[in-house]
Amino acid sequence: MAETPAAHEAVVDSLAEVWASVADACRDLDDSQWALPTDCPGWSVQDQLSHLIGVERTLLGDPAPEPVNQVPPYVKNAIGEMNEAWIEARRQRPGSEVLAEFVDVTDRRLAALRGFPPEKFDEVGWSPIGQVPYRDFMGTRLLDSWTHEQDIRRALDRPGGRNGAGETHIVTQCAGAMSFVVGKKVAPPDGTTVLFEVGGDLGRRVPVVVEGGRASVRPELPSPPTVTLAMDQETFWRLGFGRVSPADVLASGEASISGDAALGQQVLESMNFMI
């Protein structure tokens, strides 16, 4: 590829990696596979791909489809309503046609991103996580794309796309969000310490300390943890993204609690931080 102004922007390369993996996961599916349900309520494998198409076409400036006449009960906000319009517009189309559109749209997006001047990625503007540099906004696209890839792969029983740029970003984002989970959603008293022991190739220790009514992720804990939650990296991000229930991961042994069991249960049940 010829050199372009943003050719070396890391998040663009990461998106290219993940989008290629999404397309690979969806190759050669039959009608029954396209219709398989996924971990997102109401969405099939094909719907997941339609959602990604809709977001990237919106960012390209393509016109939006008409809103849906009846909003499904699993749609909880205005962004969800916009997502549903793109999905509904594709439900009667063949899955292979939707895949071809996904490849075309993501190729167009990559061409646009790689044509941006470097300073574009420093520009602060709207994103789903607030006013942030465009680079961080594209980080949310990486997060969304990789997570939905895994929804697709799980439904199809086609493992893949693991331990690369997408999952590295997702595990890091989940680790950073644990201060919000502990401090805001659980809000235990000052002096509480929570340790997340995350196993796997991208595993890490995530120590959270509550002090002055606020929680923060620290390099180390100042004392033995009040509670420790142990799990592998997949369980960690699936809990963070609401893709699996706390009760199920405890029952299966995919997660364990040591120390203050009641607090650990509260934390586990509060780990879903996605809208």
Image (cartoon, helix red, strand yellow):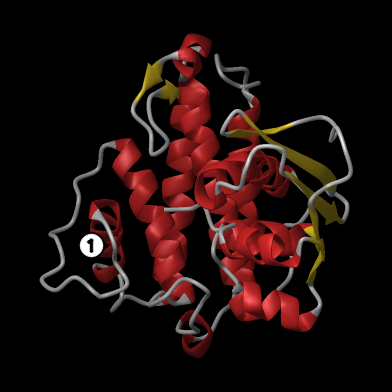
Of 206 and 19, which appears nearest the observer? 206
Considering only vertical position in the picture, is 65 above or below 136?
Answer: below
Residue furthest top in the image: 119
Residue at screen point 64% across, 46% down: 174
Q: Residue 9, image x and y in percent?
A: 62, 23
Q: Quarter of the image containing the N terminus?
A: top right
Q: Residue 170, image x and y in percent?
A: 65, 46
Q: Residue 59, image x and y in percent?
A: 34, 38
Q: Residue 207, image x and y in percent?
A: 78, 40
Considering only vertical position in the picture, is 238 above or below 5?
Answer: below
Q: Amino acid at mark 1?
A: Ala
Residue at screen point 44% across, 38% down: 109
Residue furthest bottom in the image: 32
- Secondary structure beneath label 1: helix
Q: How many marks?
A: 1
Q: Quadrant of residue 66?
A: bottom left
The residue singled out by tag 1 in the image is: 85
Q: Quadrant of residue 8?
A: top right
- Whether residue 23 is visible to the viewer of this picture, yes or no, is no
Considering only vertical position in the picture, is 198 above or below 72?
Answer: above
Pointer 1: residues within 10 angstroms few (<14), some, or many (20+)? many
Considering only vertical position in the picture, is 68 above or below 118?
Answer: below
Left or right, 193 with reference to 210: right
- Whether residue 124 is visible to the viewer of this picture, yes or no, is yes
Residue at screen point 55% across, 46% down: 187
Residue at screen point 53% across, 12% down: 118
Of 209 and 85, which appears nearest the observer? 209
Of 251 and 73, which appears nearest the observer? 251
